[in-house]
Structure formats: structure tokens, C-alpha cells
Amino acid sequence: MAFACLAYAQTSAEAAQQYQQLARDIFQELVEIKSTESGVGSTPAAESVARRLISAGFPTSDVHVIGSNERKKNLVARLHGKRASSPILLLLAHLDVVEARREDWSPDLDPFKFVERDGYFYGRGTQDIKDGAAILTANFIRWKQEGWVPEHDLILALTADEEIGGDANGVKWLLENHRELIDAGAAHTWWRWQRQRRNQPRCNCKRPTVATMGH
Ligand SMILES: [Zn+2]
């Protein structure tokens, strides 16, 4: 029994480490996609997350890359629960970032090059809010790969144009055009989630961790 418990603890610790590394890899990839207004928009980031989800086992019918124009697409994915009925939980973060000029940053840092130094992450979006997008994505991948089925559906929406708030704002566009994809009994934005963790610093100084749902 003790041996079995030890083996399980080792296995779950290894799995946690594996998915923490995955979260970090996704985080780096997202930060290095220049998803600003003057850059490539949000579509390449949405497509990257979609590829990862599909290769983790999500059916293509549950993964959508859609938006108001070619540059401003959103990612919406669904993990089906045991019951088809509400309430459904919508988990939200956005894929776009505010402009960042290379000359405004320290000479040894590029805003679109992900750097980990002395326990801190550097790069545009490390705090707002590609950390959240990466952690949520890694969790969805883990849940799917480990075969976890929640009580109710969980929806992941990583949206466009949150910072600009224009016509391509992802949440607004999805509500107006594909409400059925994000209709939920409750929604949680990563930003709010982050602020609720009162005892932890509101900075990008922690590794992304693959956590179980806490809210
Ligand atoms: Zn933001």
C-alpha cells in the first residue's frame, strides 16, 4: 500500500512537472507572437492554441478559431462535462497585447523575446495576460489527456482586441455572432482570478503553474 502511494505520488509529481513545463512552453510561444495592433494580430496565437488542443485530443468540432476579420480571430474550445445542462463555466483571457517599442525597454530586453531571469519573466504580455492564457490552455490539455470529465461543460475563450476595445473585441463579437459558443452560467476572467489571489504578488514573478480549479 505504502509503495503504491509512493508510486502514485511520484507519478502525479512527474505529471505536474510535465504540465508546468508545457504551460511554460505555451507561455513563451504566446509572448513571442507579436499580437499587437501593429503586429500580427491575435490570429496566429489563436491558431497555435487550437493546434495544441487538437493534438491533445480535442475534436475539431470543439475547437473554433473565429473572429470579425482575418487578423482578429478568437479561440473558443469546449471540454464537455457529464451533464449537458447548465451551468457552464466560461474561462476567459485575451490574446492581444498593448504595443511595445523596443527602445522603451532595457537595452538587453526585447519585448517580444521571452526571458526568464532571476525568477522573473520578461516580455510583453507576461503579466497581461498571456500567463493566464498559457495556464488555462495547459489545464485544458491536461484535463483532456488525463480523461477528466467535469460535472458541467467548461469553455475556454482566448479573445482578440481586448486592449483596443474596437469592433474586433472578441467577447463582444462572440456574443453578437456566436453566442451559443460562449453562453455560460458563470464567467471568470483571468485578470479577476489573478487579483483574487490576494496573498500572492501581482507581478509576473511566478512560474506558470498547472493548478486545479480554485474558483
Ligand atoms: Zn489585459
Image: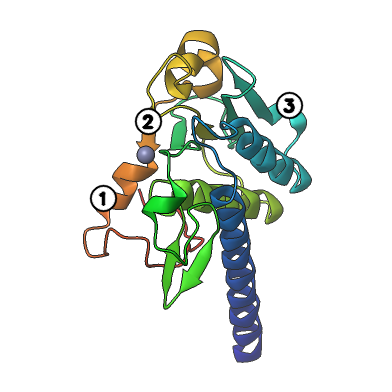
For label 3, the residue is: 61
Find out if the beta carbon at label 3 lies less than 8 Å from the nearest ligand 1 atom: no
Question: For residue 186, which numbered disc appears in the image?
Answer: 2
Q: Looking at this view, is 99 or 162 the one in front?
A: 99
Q: Given contact means CB atoms under 8 Å apart, are the residues at marks 3 and 1 in contact?
A: no
Gap in angstroms between the C-alphas marked 1 and 2 = 18 Å
Gap in angstroms between the C-alphas marked 2 and 3 = 23 Å
The numbered mark, 3 or 1, whose residue comes first in the sequence reads 3
Q: Is residue 114 left or right of residue 53?
A: left
The nearer-to-camera label among 1 and 2 is 1
Q: Position of residue 165 (x, y in %)?
A: 37, 22
Residue 74 appears in which quarter of the rendering?
Answer: top right
- Which image quadrant: the N terminus? bottom right
Q: Is residue 95 left or right of residue 54?
A: left
Q: Residue furthest bottom?
A: 3
Q: Secondary structure at mark 2?
A: strand
Q: Amino acid at mark 2?
A: Ala
Q: Secondary structure at mark 1?
A: helix
User: Label 1 neighbourhood size at 10 Å, few (<14), some (14-19), many (20+)?
Assistant: few
Q: Looking at this view, is 80 or 25 the one in front?
A: 25
Q: Position of residue 158 (x, y in %)?
A: 52, 35
Q: Residue at x 68, y 42 (%)?
A: 48
Q: Is residue 51 left or right of residue 46?
A: right
Ligand 1 quadrant? Answer: top left
Question: For residue 195, which numbered disc appears in the image?
Answer: 1
The numbered mark, 1 or 2, whose residue comes first in the sequence reads 2
Gap in angstroms between the C-alphas marked 3 and 1 = 33 Å
Q: Amino acid at mark 1?
A: Arg
